[in-house]
Amino acid sequence: MEKQWNLDKLYSDFDSSEFAEDKKNFLSLLKEINSWSVEQEQSPVQLAEKFINKLKKCYFYYSKLVAYSRLTVSVNAEDERAQKEVEKLEKKITELTRSRVRFQKWLSELDDRAKTLYENSALLAEHEFFLEELAAKSQYLLSEEEEELAARLQQTGSSAWSKLHQRLTSTLTVTLKVEGEKKELPLSEVRNMAYDKNADIRKKAYEAEIAAYDKIEKGGAAALNAIKGEVLTMTEKRGYDSPLEKTLKDSRMEEKTLETLIEAIENSLSDFRKYLKKKAEILGHKKGLPFYDLFAPVGEVGLEFEYEEAAEFIVKNIRPLSSEMADFFKKAFSSSWIDALPRANKRGGAFCYPIHPIQESRVMANFTGSFSNMLTLAHELGHAYHGHCLKEESILNTDYPMPLAETASIFSETAVHEAALEEASPEERLVILENHLSGATQIIVDIYSRFIFEKELFAERKEASLSSDELQSLMIQAQKEAYGDVLDEEHLHPYMWLNKSHYYSAGQNYYNFPYAFGFLFGLGVYALKEDNDNFMEKYKSLLKVTGKKKISEVAKQADINPGAGEFWEKSLDKVREDITLFIKLADEYA
Ligand SMILES: [Zn+2]
């Protein structure tokens, strides 16, 4: 089984004739779209069709080109050619802005006449949601010239800062003493040591990580201040009340839904604290659980995986649920879709990149053999399956909002988790539950701390920039609020703002609550499989419409109402059950 991905289906090389050819096509389509204007002799249907057709084609080439370039950079931060291509492409695509704004304004002025577009054209009917959303969002648009300027300035503004942050963190090395020998290790590798069985390694890795941030904290803080500053300027200028309002609009989500979700999370904090308290007790901490032991494995059972074993385990356990999904996962493993192992200059963490034009995805991971690494693979493959369900859709209907982005990944992760739990001995069950709950704690409790942090950050950034010290103390405050007194006050993580790349994307603010939403939504959807015969069909149809309906409408496909507290409480009850069982098993076996 190959452990590095293969991108040949995109291009063999930046110098290949295919890359040059596609680039040429992309550029000429861009030109054609930019010449789009309201010509009186053409009917509204003709005008709209022309725009949509060209846009689809343009995105086709752009997606291919930029996927290849970005994927190449993600496994080799030092590849300057790839970096340059990403930059050039991202800059080029901003040229769409002017014509898009022109089109959007024209569309919104059609008002009631827009209906006739969908009645008289199958192409436009297929893109009704896309077009309606464009029209509705035109109220937040600036003038054509301003939009173009803003898009261009963003390349040297927030986008550049965000790239700097990525470069700082992916090239940062951490000095760590391993078996008496001093080593310079990539940040991702050192952070992975949080899962190590050896308590001393976990602690040392944490201390070395915290110490290493000293080298990049000023640059990181400058990037964060610049990005959030730009976001504040732009959202205000566009007429949003706050960046949060923009995120909700972009998420196709109602404020009421977020409030209900946050309330349910707050209700569950005391339950999570019971788990954390028990974990501290098991690990022998008297002053509360230190941050570096949040991910510490508990129990004697190893549960380590070779990469091939992990692949087999995932496929085997998905099969009872859906043989189609299992075959799909198998194909991903055997067709070199996955870049599995850590190496120098490779980005940390894991992600899935769906590439609609080739109807495939690529997955990047930093697999080192833990049970949680195995679940991460299941998670990312869930994303890939989501992409697979969308492959027949128009590329313009595949852009799903952040809160729905985690549905399929959590679903697949939960399926593998449950199966592992089922076949486990009590001792193993303790280990698996622990692993699951430490993940759930991240997605609910830590995410809650990140939500508080980001809200505070925006409030303070509005007045002035924040120093690294100030960012650290904001982070600590937020962690205290979320975790309560069960964490060791002296050992929190003041640099989470520097570590998490989510804060550094100007286009995606508050990329935290969508995780909690996605986790609980995925759990809720998964729970429905119990009393539903053709559940997998319902599930697939839900995934299929994620890019072309509002969240409440998508949820309706599976009879879910995300505006009601009940739904969230039910998902959280599932976690509460796990906490109770964990405490019981811990008392017996730990
Ligand atoms: Zn994910």
Image: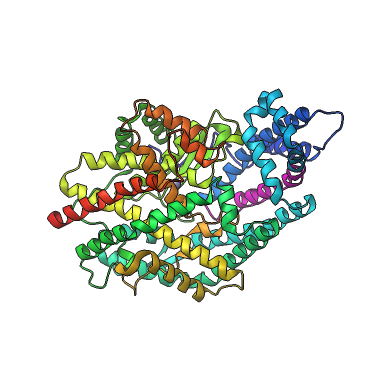
Can see residue 456? yes
- Where residue 528 appears, as percent x and y from the top left, is 35, 35
Q: Which residue is at 78% across, 49% downward?
A: 144
Q: Residue at x 36, y 31 (%)?
A: 326
Above or below 343: residue 380: above
Q: Taken as a whole, is the magenta stretch helix, strand or loop?
A: helix
**What residue sits 28% from the left and 45% below the top?**
305
- Is residue 349 in view? no
The picture places residue 105, in percent across and down from the top left corner, at: 76, 43
Q: Nearer the viewer, residue 353 or 394?
A: 394
Report the side of 447 relative to 320 (left or right).
right
Q: Which residue in the rendered view is the most extreme toward the left?
A: 588
Please name the residue shown 52% across and 67% down the image. Answer: 456
Left or right of 120 in this view: 296: left
Using residue 308 as the reference point, say whether residue 354 is left or right of it: right
Residue 353 versus residue 201 in the image, above or below: above
- State whether residue 300 is above or below residue 386: below
Q: Position of residue 467 (x, y in %)?
A: 55, 75
Q: Residue furthest right?
A: 41
Nearest the camera: 76 or 401?
401
Of 331 and 51, nearer the camera is 51
Quadrant of the image occupied by residue 394? top right
